[in-house]
Amino acid sequence: MAHLANLNGVSETLPAVPNLPRFQKFQKRAKIIGLIDHKAENFQDQAHITRRLSLGLASLALIGSTSTNGVSLAEDNGLWVTGPLPVPPVYNNIANEKTGTRSFLKKAIYIANIGTKGRIHRLKRYAFDLLAMADLIGPDTLNYVRKYLRLKSTFMYYDFDNVISAAAPTDKQPLTDLANRLFDSFEKLEVAVSTKNFPQTQSTYADTAVILHEVMDRMA
């Protein structure tokens, strides 16, 4: 009994263990979980960086294996242009006889080789686009008209050359004559637009529209 009494005395002298509020327990648990999540995120980031580094090294190895003497062969696949945009050659007599070229030709334009059928379709489509430009011609829009005219006419120039080259012998000269009449009219129209002569632009465009209809009929 004395032993039990001593135990009771010791228990009485010991301070009571305070009951922690629930929110303190929750904060401790949240800190532990947050620490674990932070470590997991660091591990995922390191794994992601390592994976990206591996892919980068693999890409470099692939590029190195497809090159000769350190020079990439990408330029040989027909999809890359490593230098200035090439100027397509012209094989038919559709240039201006006095200048040897056409004043409306725009530089630094890539003319995709879409085949003869594709070029015929594009000639018809661009002739239609230039006919639809009639409603846009006004005294305050001549700068935009000139840019649009040069863009469309440049494609039509090189497309016409390709179509003439692929045409039957009996069709070559009629197509050449049609192209020259069209491009002569384009040059006159560009002069009128560049000088911002609106009455002359209207009359020249009316003449050009007649030839554009002929182009659409011929390419139908």
Image (spheres, rainbow, N blue to C red):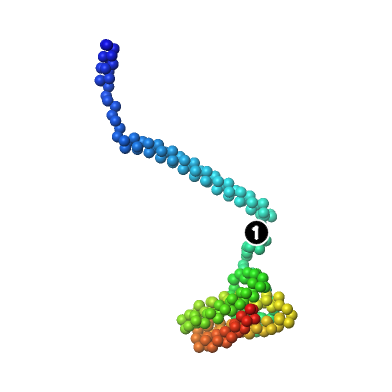
- Is 46 situated above or below 96? above
The quarter of the picture where residue 149 lies is bottom right
Q: Nearer the viewer, residue 213 or 67?
A: 213
Residue 207, percent from left and from top: 57, 87
Q: Quadrant of residue 165?
A: bottom right
Are there few (<14), some (14-19), or many (20+) residues within 10 Å of tag 1?
some
Residue type, mark 1 in image = Ala
In x, y percent, where is residue 5? 26, 14
Q: Work out whether residue 185 can be spotted.
A: no
Residue at 57% over, 79% down: 128
Q: Nearer the viewer, residue 21 or 102?
A: 21
Answer above or below: position of 189 versus 122. below
The outermost residue toward the right is: 169
Q: Position of residue 129 (x, y in %)?
A: 55, 77
Q: Which residue is mark 1?
A: 74
**Residue 46 vs residue 160: left or right?**
left
* Relative image position of residue 31 (x, y in whole percent): 38, 38
**Quarter of the picture holding the N terminus:** top left
